[in-house]
Image: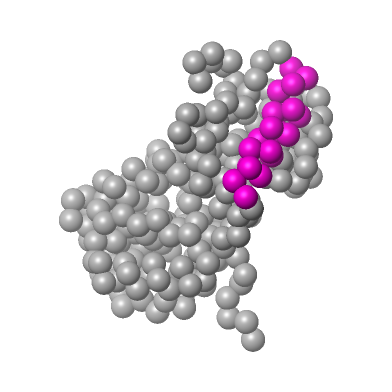
Amino acid sequence: MQLFEDSSLKVLLIEDNTTIATQIVEFLGAHQWQVDYAQNGQQGAALALAEIFDVILLDLNLPDIDGLQVCQMIKQQAQVTPPILMLTARDSFEDKSAGFHQGADDYLTKPVDLRELVLRCQALARRSNLHQSQIIQVGPLQLDLSAQTAQRDGQSLTLTSIGFQLLTLLAQSYPQPVSRTLITHKLWGESPPDSDSLKSHIYSLRQALDKPFPHAMLKTVMNLGYRLDINNDPHS
């Protein structure tokens, strides 16, 4: 029987104990997951608000900011709200209640069984995807995730499968940019094609999304990636 699903997740681990962090990063990495790591609350919150993660693993006891505050900050400010799994040695009902009231989606007490951690991450990511709205509206752009269709100003866009996935990433992150690294990971996982493939898909997306219209929505963010713009900002 296969224990784990063949799904690659992007995970943020916020944990100040380097021994525990190393164990988690190595275990999840062995399952081909992409794991970003922060050693304190400020760094973790900054990463959580700058990138899109499938799941965030958050230690409750951090050296600078209490994990409950970090959880609340992420839930209130993130453009795409990620599920948060609390990791802590505090196992009283009061501690768990405080975590859930600040927005935590699940709770694991230390020491953590890493196999259970994987299963819980997968369950949280699945639940998060099911609860997402199937319609995304960004200015004149509308995406129907269930039908895999896109319209701009009511006009249907002809997109490839990867083009639709790429546009969905940009729409979910709007108005924040999406890095080339994250796009590559989301589209191709741990087996990315050559570096020109993303450029080719960006070009095709521009042809479908922008060429028939007077203003471009897909903008390049220098040294980072791409974002959607509905205000026709000439400086972006």
User: Looking at the image, which is closer to me, 168 or 131?
Assistant: 168
At a point 24% along the width and 66% down the height, the residue shown is 17
In the image shown, does 180 or 129 lie closer to the viewer?
Answer: 180
**Residue 92 is drawn in which quadrant?**
bottom left
- For this rendering, which residue is in front, 172 or 123? 172
Depicted 91 relative to depicted 8: above or below: below
Q: Look at 60% across and 35% down and name the residue there.
A: 171
Q: Which residues are magenta?
A: 194-213
Residue 34 percent across, percent down from the top left:
48, 59
Tell me: 231 left or right of 42. right
Q: What residue sits 76% from the left and 29% below the top? A: 208
Q: Is residue 200 magenta?
A: yes
Q: Position of residue 174 (x, y in %)?
A: 54, 32
Task: From the image, give the main secondary structure of the stretch colored magenta.
Answer: helix
Residue 82 to residue 215: above or below: below
Q: Is residue 89 above or below residue 171?
A: below
**Which residue is located at x 30 percent, y 74 percent?**
110
